Amino acid sequence: MFYKKIYKYLFFIILIFYPNLTMANQSILYIDMNYLLNNSLAGKSIVAQLKNLNEKNLKKFKKIQEGLKLEENKLISQQKILEKEEYAKQLNNFRKKISNYETERRNNNDNVLKKKSNAQKELLNVIDPILKDYSKKNSVLYIIPKKNIIIGNTELDITQIILKLLDNNIKKIDIK
């Protein structure tokens, strides 16, 4: 709470002593990073690759799940036929298979999330020099993310400009 008060005072002091910051409309711009990540050509390629990977994984795990369901039904039907020891042994084996299936599925989901994160980081690494170059060429002091803005003039939004520059720079990012 004490720090909040200090930050407020510092903010007002900066505004008082640096009036050129408050007067320079075009030196503080904003950008919608989520829009860039999802709508750039490279971002769309990431989304498409992840969608294909998820579809493959769903098919794979659905097939395994169907096999486990058949095995479960077979085990249930043999419950009265098999001796208790043999049934307990097969039940333990079945439980291990289910546990392995769940672990493999969890690991697979974690792997997909890591791939998504790495691809987005790679895309952000491409966006960063574009923003720096744009800032330098246009004498921009600050480019802030749109998510941190409550109200802003739409003329200060450079998302579409950066999107065009990004699409000209990179078309696709392969997920690894």
Image: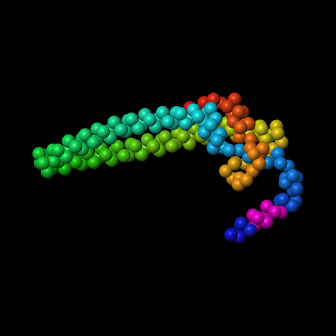
Q: Quadrant of residue 34?
A: top right
At 60% from the left and 30% from the top, the residue drawn is 172
Instruction: State yes or no: residue 8 in magenta.
Output: yes
Q: Is residue 63 above or below residue 153?
A: above
Residue that lies at the very extreme toward the bottom in this rendered image: 2
Q: Is residue 156 above or below residue 51?
A: below
Instruction: State yes or no: residue 83 in magenta.
Output: no
Rendered location of residue 136, percent (x, y): 81, 40
The N terminus: image quadrant: bottom right
Rendered location of residue 171, percent (x, y): 63, 29
Residue bounds of the magenta highlight? 6-13
2 lies left or right of 67: right
Q: Is residue 82 above or below residue 47?
A: below
At 42% from the left and 37% from the top, the residue drawn is 57
- The secondary structure that most of the magenta stretch takes on is helix
Depth check: give the residue in front, 106 or 74.
74
**Which of the colour schemes (rainbow, by chain, secondary structure, one colour) is used?**
rainbow
96 lies left or right of 112: left
